């Protein structure tokens, strides 16, 4: 969205990159928060293009300053690695 790569046609989002997906409900949620707007698209095969608002650009820029979450956690506690003493007793 930051680069204008999201377009909407028949209420279905399209992206320039095939490896990224965004749902119409996500676009609507961002619209309701004032972070994106839809504008008429000059492409004849797309109805609207999604753009970040000033607030959306500000929030996106601020997100780059936030620390990234740590790695994924598992539902099971990690098993302890065998120690040298435990290895010798076998």
Image (cartoon, rainbow, N blue to C red):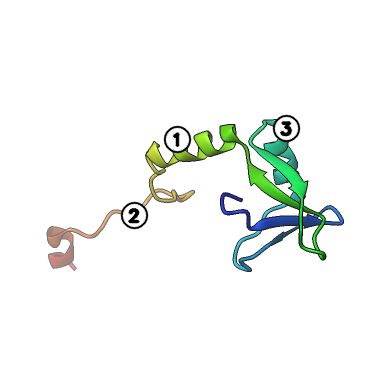
Measuring from the top left, give residue 83's x and y in whole percent.
Answer: 17, 58
The numbered dot on residue 32 is 3
Nearer-the-camera pick, 79 or 42: 42
Q: Within 10 Å of the Cα at label 3, are there few (<14), some (14-19), or many (20+) other Cα atoms?
A: few
Residue 62 placement, left or right of 38: left
Measuring from the top left, give residue 16's x and y in whole percent.
Answer: 64, 65
The numbered dot on residue 14 is none
How far is mark 1 from mark 2, CA to CA? 38 Å
The numbered dot on residue 79 is 2
Helix, strand or loop at label 3? It is helix
Q: Within 10 Å of the Cα at label 2, are there few (<14), some (14-19), or many (20+) other Cα atoms?
A: few
Helix, strand or loop at label 1? It is helix
- The residue sitting at the front extreme is 42
Residue 71 placement, left or right of 37: left
Residue pictured at 70% horizontal, 45% vertical:
26
Q: Earlier in the sequence, mark 3 or mark 1?
A: 3
Residue pictured at 87% horizontal, 56% vertical:
10
Q: Earlier in the sequence, mark 1 or mark 2?
A: 1
Helix, strand or loop at label 2? It is loop
Residue 62: quadrant of the picture: top left
Q: Within 10 Å of the Cα at label 1, are there few (<14), some (14-19), or many (20+) other Cα atoms?
A: few
Nearer-the-camera pick, 50 or 84: 50
Do callouts 1 and 2 mark residues in contact (Cβ within 8 Å)?
no
* Residue assigned mark 1: 62
How far is mark 3 from mark 1, CA to CA? 19 Å
Do callouts 3 and 2 mark residues in contact (Cβ within 8 Å)?
no
Count of numbered labels shown in the rendering = 3
Nearer mark to the viewer, of 3 and 2:
3
Residue 83 placement, left or right of 41: left
Measuring from the top left, give residue 51's x and y in whole percent.
Answer: 65, 46
Residue pictured at 40% horizontal, 43% vertical:
68
Q: Earlier in the sequence, mark 3 or mark 2?
A: 3
């Amino acid at each position: 969205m930051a680069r204008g790569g999201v377009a909407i046609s028949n209420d279905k989002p399209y992206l320039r990159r095939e490896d990224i997906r965004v749902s119409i409900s996500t676009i609507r949620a961002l619209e309701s928060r004032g972070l994106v707007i839809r504008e008429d698209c000059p492409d004849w095969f797309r109805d609207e293009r999604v753009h970040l608002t000033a607030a959306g650009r500000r929030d996106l820029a601020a997100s780059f300053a936030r620390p990234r979450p740590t790695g994924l956690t598992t539902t099971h506690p990690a098993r302890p690695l065998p120690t040298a003493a435990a290895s010798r007793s076998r």
